[in-house]
Image (cartoon, rainbow, N blue to C red):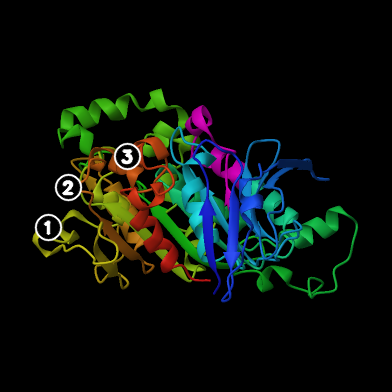
Amino acid sequence: MASVELEETPSEPVRKVEVNGEGGSKTSEKSKKKKKKKKKEKDKNGAYRYYMSKLGFGCVRLRTEYDKEGNFDMEVVDGDGQRRNPTHLVIMANGLIGSAENWRYAAKQFLKKYPEDVIAHCSECNPSKLTFDGVDNMGDRLAEEVISVIKRHPGVQKISFVGHSLGGLVTRYVIAKLYGRDVRREFAQENGERRSDGSGDPCPEEKFKGKIAGLEPMNFITFATPHLGSRGHKQVPVFCGFYTMEKVASRASWLLGRTGKHLFLTDKDNGKPPLLLRMANDCEDLKFISALQSFKRRVTYANVRYDHLVGWSTSSLRRRDELPKHRHLSKDDKYRHIVNVETAETSSRQQEFLLEAKVNGFENIDLEEQMLRGLTKLTWERIDVNFSGTKQRYLAHSTIQVNRYCINSAGADVVKNYCINFAGADVVHHMIDNFLL
């Protein structure tokens, strides 16, 4: 595979990529010193494409394509701006009060590793205060956005999702919305066209039953995601395990809008169980577990310590007595903040669990156990991360994603080599190096 060198300054919205073959490529000193021009073009879908002017023979570029809402795709293009027909779409979703920019570093590393294969789409349909709208509403928006991206890139055949924190819950909702749908068939019907690729079969739904939006599901990856919510059981470390503080937070969940109710499991829409509980099983209208099962890999990255917002147990989908002992954790030689890698088999503790157990005349439903039993019907790769000994450890929740250059950089004086000095860069590279194409 050709090597890729990326050059950028964090403040620039336009990126440059150079790919060198075996013989390498040469750029004259004159052209190096020449000021690069930024180009901005608007396509027929209203999206803006930003890229650098041609640098010379053997040079390709990293194009960042924005749409009207601020979402952007990153892909490698040839020197003349022609796409390379990548087939794997990677959807990246931000967490609470986040934005598409949070995933820019990881998106660039994806393209550096797989310049011929990947389109990295950083979603911004749920930025800032819109993250208070609830997991379902955020999921509906992201599902529509994914459809629009596929429409813009008709050559894609595979799809993967990467979500940070709340974004992991949102992507779990999205894949259920898109499970079994053939969006290209829907596009054709909208345009009054008839497809000749088999979509005229008597049971087209069966053909796409294991697909997500008509694409082959590959990797489903979450970073520091509260899969079991934030209600009690020491799931939010900042409360220090004090029941009183957890109870007060639960009652004040409305401060985070509909999202707060979902996270603290206090939502009761039309008498239904909490949304996160429903998302741990297949429902009549949304097949949450079937959609997850369709992916070839399901991976959780979880902070062992210093994540004050999302606990180790909920982000790694384990019971507290299943968490590895700290003395058994050891740093990886290549990825120094990865301290444990576990490929989980289907839980041996799977049993039929009574949803309604009555104790002293009251309903006593262990919601956390319910969600765990539903989600661990599937196998998960669990990657445990520990930033102990780094200056960024107290910001572990964001450091694991490398979402802010100024915070996660080891020093402002080292600008060109900032990616090497990110505390969480090795975690991102671990994800990419183990990514299933």
Q: Residue at x 31, y 51 (%)?
A: 315
* Residue that mark 1 sits on: 326
Tell me the distance, in whole angstroms, between the alpha carbons under discs 3 and 1. Answer: 30 Å
> How would you rate the neighbour count of disc 1 (Cα within 10 Å): few for under 14, some for 14-19, many for 20 or more?
few
Left or right? Give the position of 276 relative to 318: right
Work out whether 21 lies above or below 289: below
Q: Nearer the viewer, mark 3 or mark 1?
A: 3
Give SS at disc 1: helix
Q: Nearer the viewer, mark 2 or mark 1?
A: 2
Tell me the distance, in whole angstroms, between the alpha carbons under discs 2 and 1. Answer: 15 Å
Residue 249 place in picture, x, y as percent: 28, 28
Q: Residue at x 68, y 47 (%)?
A: 51
> How would you rate the neighbour count of disc 2 (Cα within 10 Å): few for under 14, some for 14-19, many for 20 or more?
few
- N-terminal of the pair, mark 2 or mark 1, is 1
Task: Between residue 434 and residue 353, name the one nearer to us.
Answer: 434
Q: Residue at x 22, y 56 (%)?
A: 319
- N-terminal of the pair, mark 3 or mark 1, is 1
Residue type pointed to by label 1: His
- N-terminal of the pair, mark 2 or mark 3, is 2
Q: Residue furthest right?
A: 192
Work out whether 375 lies above or below 116: above
* Residue that mark 2 sits on: 389
Q: Are marks 3 and 1 in contact (CB under 8 Å)?
A: no
Q: Residue at x 31, y 63 (%)?
A: 382
Please state the total of marks drawn on the protein image: 3
Residue type pointed to by label 3: Gly
Task: Between residue 54 and residue 338, name the one nearer to us.
Answer: 54
Residue type pointed to by label 2: Gly
Q: Determine if the magenta segment contains residue 247.
A: no
